[in-house]
Image (cartoon, rainbow, N blue to C red):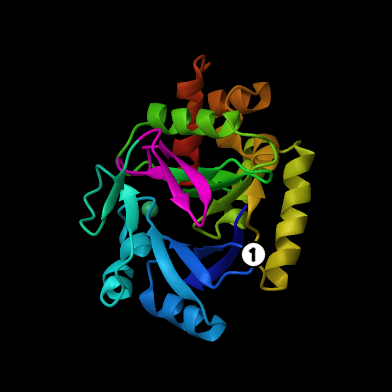
Amino acid sequence: MFNVTPIPAFSDNYIWVLSTEGSNSVAVVDPGDASAVETYLEENNLTLEAILITHHHNDHTGGVAELTAKRNIPIYGPANSPFEGISNPLSNDDTIELFNQTLAIREIPGHTLDHISYYSAHKKPQLFCGDTLFLAGCGRLFEGSAKQMLDAMQYFSSLPDSAEVYCTHEYSLANLNFAAAVEPSNRDIRTSITTCNSLRDNDKPTLPTSIAEEKKINPFMRTSTPTVIDAASNFSAKKLISEVEVFAAIREWKNQF
Ligand SMILES: [Zn+2]
């Protein structure tokens, strides 16, 4: 497994720093802000060895040019990305070796068409999923379809419950408020609100979350649960049958929430 630490950036982004025990070599995921990364590297005496990109948005890629101006390091990212700074393009079922550990690539379009995730299937599995899965939420559908995003949710559901989930944004409390509106009687959501409030009060990230937790609290991963189907049908004022209809209704509801 990787040691993972966050560099907070902008108002609510996390740039995740990956390393292994006893080494000063690190990789960063989605470095939108070069100066935040440089400061962290300098303060902790670390060497940047690789960059992992999940999708093209500027708050995920904006620091790449500056970080690589004086470093000759691989920049991994989606093969179909409009972002032009990728040196090692990746597609479905590719794997990369990072500090002697394997990361499996999965294309998870929806938020954007070029979105990928990185998954490490070690004793403690770890998922780096950019803006696709959030604690109690999912990314907005800027480029892809509800069907594509639902497919991504189903991929995440297929991962081990113990997998840690590293998302890029601190959106947890807003997402949980929405999740509680969808499922007012879901006690796990209430518990998570209490936990996340206390973490934020102490200025700590609410992340990582886990696949097990998301299956309990995330309406976008619960589109086959009767309470979520009923709530989505209520919102749409018609009986929704298919999971993709339920997903699309919940996404639309969240957009308006
Ligand atoms: Zn994005």
Q: Say whether residue 19 is magenta.
A: no
**Callout 1, which amino acid?**
Glu
Relative to 142, residue 231 above or below: above
Expressed as whole percent of the image width and height from the top left, the position of residue 25 reads: 50, 69
Q: Residue at left 65%, top 59%? A: 206
Q: Is the residue marked 1 within 8 Å of ligand 1, measured from its CB?
A: no
Asked whether 204 or 15 is in front, the reply is 15
Expressed as whole percent of the image width and height from the top left, the position of residue 57 reads: 32, 56
Q: Answer left or right for 59 relative to 99.
A: left
Q: Answer left or right for 248 relative to 207.
A: left
Expressed as whole percent of the image width and height from the top left, the position of residue 242 reads: 49, 16
Q: Residue at left 46%, top 63%? A: 27
Label 1: how many Cα within 10 Å (few below 14, some 14–19, many 20+): few
Q: Answer left or right for 9 relative to 56.
A: right
Q: Residue at left 76%, top 57%? A: 195
Magenta-highlighted residues: 92-116
Residue bearing mark 1? 21
Q: Quadrant of residue 38?
A: bottom left
Q: Residue at left 66%, top 21%? A: 226
Classify mark 1: helix, strand or loop: loop
Expressed as whole percent of the image width and height from the top left, the position of residue 255 reads: 44, 45
Q: Say whether residue 97 is magenta.
A: yes
User: Tag count in the figure?
Assistant: 1
Whether residue 91 is visible, yes or no, is yes
Asked whether 201 or 94 is in front, the reply is 94
Whether residue 138 is visible, yes or no, is no
Relative to 18, residue 146 above or below: above
Relative to 231, residue 52 above or below: below
